[in-house]
Amino acid sequence: MATVSEFLRTETRDRHAATEQAMARAADLTTDAGWNTYFGVMYAVTAEHADALDDAAMLADVPPRSERLLVALERDAAAAADLEPVVASSAEAIAGIAYTLEGSALGAEVLRRRLPVGRRSAYLDLLIDGRADRWRAIRRWLDTMPASSMPVMLRWADETFGRTLALCESGAHRR
């Protein structure tokens, strides 16, 4: 039997790939427009899911950091939308959101290497700081969830990928 995190990785593979491809098309970090798109999208999706991220951190016994992420994103992004927060009303919903957004930190080092020489990102630096230990703690917590909760976690993970994709493609992350 697959662990919860393995199940989520397998079942969200297509949505994850589509989101990455859309971000690669719309958010070339070597251009100002691409820079603003990437950090604007990440600001919007982080702001919408901040409470769930902090709840997941507490449940995984790691420090909450949504506020620090948003401050870093504000410094990096020229455009940030005023969006309604997503209310995750169950541990399963929180787990699906955390899988998607905490897992995205694993690619931060790749993105940082794509930045033009001399350009820094407070957000990417924050994601990279302690990411391996944080992700292990999140995965340990995810893998304690009962198998019966996998469909609900998958729905929330898929919706979070979908929301990120929609923000990227629509430009709705701009004020």
Image (cartoon, rainbow, N blue to C red):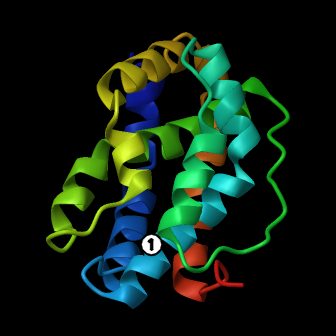
Tell which of 119 and 143 is nearer to you. Answer: 119
Q: Amino acid at mark 1?
A: Tyr
Query: What percent of the width, then of the height, locates residue 17?
Result: 34, 62
Task: Classify 108 as above or below 98.
Answer: below
> In the figure, is residue 128 to the left or right of 150?
left
For residue 80, which quarter of the picture?
Answer: bottom right
> In the figure, is residue 79 to the left or right of 37?
right
Task: Classify 66 as above or below 160.
Answer: above
For residue 160, which quarter of the picture?
Answer: bottom right
For residue 21, which quarter of the picture?
Answer: bottom left
Task: Classify 34 as above or below 144.
Answer: below
Per the image, the residue denoted by label 1 is 38
* Residue found at the far front of this picture: 118
Query: What percent of the width, then of the height, locates residue 133?
Result: 35, 19
Whether residue 152 is visible, yes or no, is no
Q: Residue at x 80, y 40 (%)?
A: 88
Crowding around mark 1 (Cα neighbors within 10 Å: few <14, some 14 to 19, many 20+) is many
Q: Residue at x 44, y 21 (%)?
A: 139
Query: What percent of the width, then of the height, locates residue 125?
Result: 34, 47
Query: What percent of the width, then of the height, locates residue 5?
Result: 43, 27
